Amino acid sequence: MEVGSLSRNGEGRMKRKDVIEKKKAVEEALKAASSVKDPLTSFSPFRRYDTPGLSVHLKSGRGDKLSSPIKQYIQNLLKVVNMEGPYGSEWPTEKKMKCREMVAPEARYIFVHSFPDSGTNEMAKSLANGKTSNTITGDRATIVGFVQYRFTIEEDLPVLYVYELQLEPHLQGKGLGRFLMQLIELIACKNCMGAVVLTVQKANSLAMNFYIGMMNGFKRALFDVFKATVHANWRWHITHHQLNFLGYTIASISPSKVNPLIGVDSSYEILCKAFSDEAKAKLEV
């Protein structure tokens, strides 16, 4: 056998070994992230959100531990309040899919609980109209929204995929959605995820504007410094006012990027915010 052939075979074995090791590292990262019982433990400042006229606290959960009232609440919030309109004729099919996703063992939740003196008039009106279900949890607090997410793989990278971010109408426009997404990004970084990924219906213009916001150079630099600090040292304290932007981009795996001619007719876009250089190269090109 020639020397050149031996060299190529050796390089091939090394590449295969690298691929196997990388795959194993990704699987271990997902397993470790999914094993965390309460991700809020590392983020005490994010357990509460207080602003004039609104006081809520957050609790974590998982899909295979949901009670029947919470399942019903999620279904009602998705159908009546937030999602039936943007999906249009696709909603019956999407509803079945979302019901399966809702209770999957790998589904993780951040539930938003309001206190009795926070928006009770609005809540009463919603309940009277049958828009949501009155899900009371131990300390007289009512669930008024949630984030559903998973740790999964995109483009051979570990990512946190946001399946749902849903808030009742009277909570929207008060900074709570931004606060929750900042928490999600921190959970992703702490668990060594390469990016946060999510899907948005094109018809949902409010959601598209919410995620794809203009981020100037100063804010991008500030955010990059903050991420580096978070990775290096977890003894920090931050309020939601210190990070007031999202700056997601249309991902390279979104239909409009994969095939622009066909993607233009797609009803959705896949958005992302990448944290590692590898993730940026694969998802933000």
Image (tube, rainbow, N blue to C red):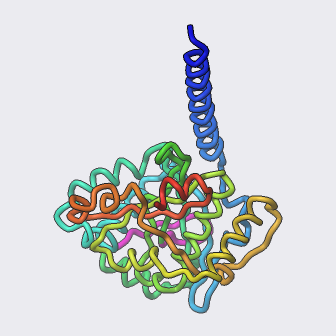
Q: Quadrant of residue 129?
A: bottom left
Is residue 69 among what the camera can see? no
- Which residue extends farthest bottom? 52
Q: Is residue 201 above or below residue 97?
A: below
Q: Residue furthest top?
A: 1
| 279 to the left or right of 38 | left
**Residue 278 locus on image (x, y percent):** 58, 52
The image shows residue 16, relative to residue 105, as above or below, that is: above
- Of the 4 image quadrants, the one containing the N terminus is top right
Pick the residue in front: 111 or 10.
10
Q: Quadrant of residue 209?
A: bottom left
Residue 191 x/y as whole percent:
66, 51
Q: Determine the residue positioned at 67% across, 61% down.
A: 40
Based on the displayed image, in which of its 4 quarters is residue 233 positioned?
Answer: bottom right
Residue 139 belongs to the span the image colors magenta: yes
- Residue closest to the far left: 89
Image point (73%, 64%), residue name: 228
Tell me, yes or no, if residue 154 can be seen here: yes
Camera-side residue of 150 and 105? 150
183 falls in the magenta region: no
- 51 left or right of 102 in image: right
Q: Which residues are magenta?
A: 131-144
Q: Residue at x 35, y 47 (%)?
A: 100
Horizontal side, residue 99 vs residue 182: left or right: left
Residue 191 appears left or right of 168: right
Residue 83 picture location, percent across and down: 31, 69
Tell me residue 120's x, y (percent). Answer: 49, 84
Q: How many marks?
A: 0
Q: Is residue 255 or residue 123 the one in the foreground?
A: 255
Residue for point 59% across, 58% down: 60
